[in-house]
């Protein structure tokens, strides 16, 4: 199967506010706008009227995405964010390479994950993620029903963060230190 290359209209690109060095990787034209993946983030730009004038733009950095699952029957990506929020992202009937690109970008941002297990496979995931600027950020992804503020859990999470920072040899800015 061949994918046809889709170019985004200049007003859509302008509304998205791409950063320096940010490139478009995959695009899906959807009812009322565009969904696209860049080297830095997932974007949705809605448009108004026949002229396609951008109305709203939303951007979520890959480091803020915990998972993204394709729901073909609804023509959506079910995006779960690290902070626990969900985002239903339209991909249309012909999403092209968009779902695969999203999955690849999310996976490639993850450097390492450690689980602080609270109950049988559930707990707090300490995740090291690489930003487009090549910095590494540490995040917490908390499983449903887990309270990370419980003193014993908080102490274990803090120890996991310290261990991960040392193992990755990160400086205070999240950059690998020199050895």
Image (spheres, rainbow, N blue to C red):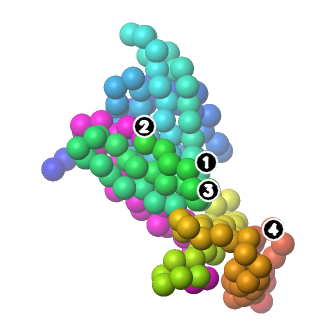
Q: Secondary structure at mark 1?
A: loop
Q: Is residue 150 located in the magenta-colored stretch of the structure? A: no
Tell which tag, 3 or 1, sits nearer the viewer: 3
- Residue 71 visible from this viewpoint: yes
Where residue 64 sits in the image (x, y, percent)?
59, 56
Cβ atoms at labels 1 and 2 below 8 Å apart = no
Name which residue lies at 42% across and 62% down.
104
Cβ atoms at labels 4 and 2 below 8 Å apart = no
Which residue is the site of mark 1?
21
- Whichever of labels 4 and 1 marks the residue nearer the N terminus, that label is 1
Which residue is the site of mark 2?
35
Where residue 110 sits in the image (x, y, percent)?
54, 70
Distance of mark 4 from mark 3, alpha carbons?
Answer: 21 Å
Number of other residues with Cα within 10 Å of mark 1, as a class: few under 14, some 14 to 19, many 20 or more:
few
Taking the view exactly as shown, the residue that stands out farthest to the left is 1
Name which residue lies at 46% across and 60% down.
67
- Whichever of labels 1 and 2 marks the residue nearer the N terminus, that label is 1
Q: Magenta region: which residues?
A: 89-117
Query: Looking at this view, is 11 or 74 the one in front?
Result: 74
Distance of mark 4 from mark 1, alpha carbons?
Answer: 21 Å
Number of other residues with Cα within 10 Å of mark 3, as a class: few under 14, some 14 to 19, many 20 or more:
few
- Whichever of labels 3 and 2 marks the residue nearer the N terminus, that label is 2
Which residue is the site of mark 3?
83
Which residue is the site of mark 4?
173
């Amino acid at each position: 199967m061949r994918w046809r290359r889709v170019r985004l209209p200049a007003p859509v690109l302008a509304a998205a506010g791409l950063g320096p060095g940010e490139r478009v990787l995959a695009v899906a034209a959807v009812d009322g706008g565009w969904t696209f993946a860049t080297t830095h983030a997932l974007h949705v730009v809605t448009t108004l009227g026949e002229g396609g004038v951008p109305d709203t733009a939303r951007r979520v950095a890959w480091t803020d995405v915990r998972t993204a699952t394709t729901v073909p029957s609804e023509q959506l990506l079910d995006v779960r964010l690290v902070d626990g929020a969900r985002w239903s992202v339209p991909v249309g009937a012909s999403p092209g390479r968009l779902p695969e690109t999203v999955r690849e970008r999310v996976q490639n941002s993850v450097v390492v994950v450690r689980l602080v297990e609270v109950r049988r496979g559930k707990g707090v995931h300490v995740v090291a993620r690489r930003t487009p600027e090549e910095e590494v950020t540490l995040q917490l992804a908390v499983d449903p029903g887990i309270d990370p503020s419980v003193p014993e859990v908080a102490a274990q999470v803090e120890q996991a963060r310290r261990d991960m920072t040392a193992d990755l040899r990160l400086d205070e800015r999240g950059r690998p230190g020199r050895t």
